[in-house]
Amino acid sequence: FEKVTNVIVADNRMACLAARSKAEELGYAALVLACGIGGDTTEAALVHTSIAREILASDYPVCAPACIISGGETTVVVKGWGKGGRNQEFALVCAREIDQLPGKVVILSGGTDGTDGPTDAAGGLVDNLSAGRGRDKRLAIEAYLADNDAYHYLEATGDLLITGPTRTNVMDLHIVLVEKM
């Protein structure tokens, strides 16, 4: 290994900063929270949705239209027999939490490699109408979360993020867009 050279050409920080740059170009007030988010998926999703609510209520920590970005990899405590992955679970928790918020809230949680858990999805892309689409189909978010079955809920509501394999992995990205109506 004496003649081996490793070169890192991209990492999660670069992905987060590129997302921030694009968001600013599109007119959003953009903030990168952190590039090493870890821990429990549900807890991380609750923090992100709390920030969205705060922006809608007080324009803090940034004014709407806002884009909150984070990266890293969270973990899921598997209790059920469903299908999904950490990004799909993150998105489904967010869908529950932003249900019927005023304004427009859109949240993406995705694996940069194009896969999440043992599925063909990279994650989920939900908005504050996702839970309503589920109710229209008689789906109960709590039941799907209890069974770790975010994939089938998001599939039924059209909120799965399917990109195909990217052949690159710089961890996960979470993007929260908030606009007032």
Image (tube, rainbow, N blue to C red):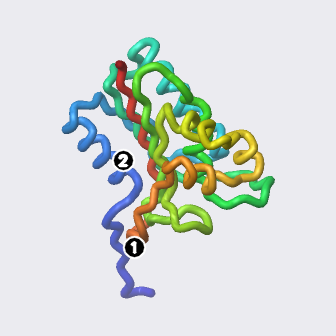
Q: Amino acid at mark 2?
A: Cys
Q: Amino acid at mark 1?
A: Arg
Q: Position of residue 158 (x, y in %)?
A: 49, 50
- Assess disc 2: are there few (<14), some (14-19) or many (≥20) residues with their C-alpha within 10 Å of its C-alpha: many
Disc 1 to disc 2, C-alpha distance: 18 Å
> In this rendering, would 121 be left or right of 14?
right
Answer with mark 1 or mark 2, whichever residue precedes in sequence: 2
Q: Secondary structure at mark 1?
A: loop
The relative height of residue 161 versus residue 40 in the rendered view (above or below) is below
Disc 1 target residue? 167
Disc 2 target residue? 16
Q: Please identify the quarter of the rendering in which residue 26 is found.
A: top left
Q: Please identify the quarter of the rendering in which residue 85 is found.
A: bottom right
- Assess disc 1: are there few (<14), some (14-19) or many (≥20) residues with their C-alpha within 10 Å of its C-alpha: few
| Quarter of the image that includes the N terminus | bottom left
Q: Residue at x 41, y 22 (%)?
A: 103
Tell which of 137 and 87 is nearer to you: 137
Numbered disc total? 2
Residue 52 visible in this rendered orientation of the protein = yes
> In this rendering, would 119 be left or right of 71?
right
Q: Secondary structure at mark 2?
A: helix
Q: Position of residue 102 (x, y in %)?
A: 46, 19
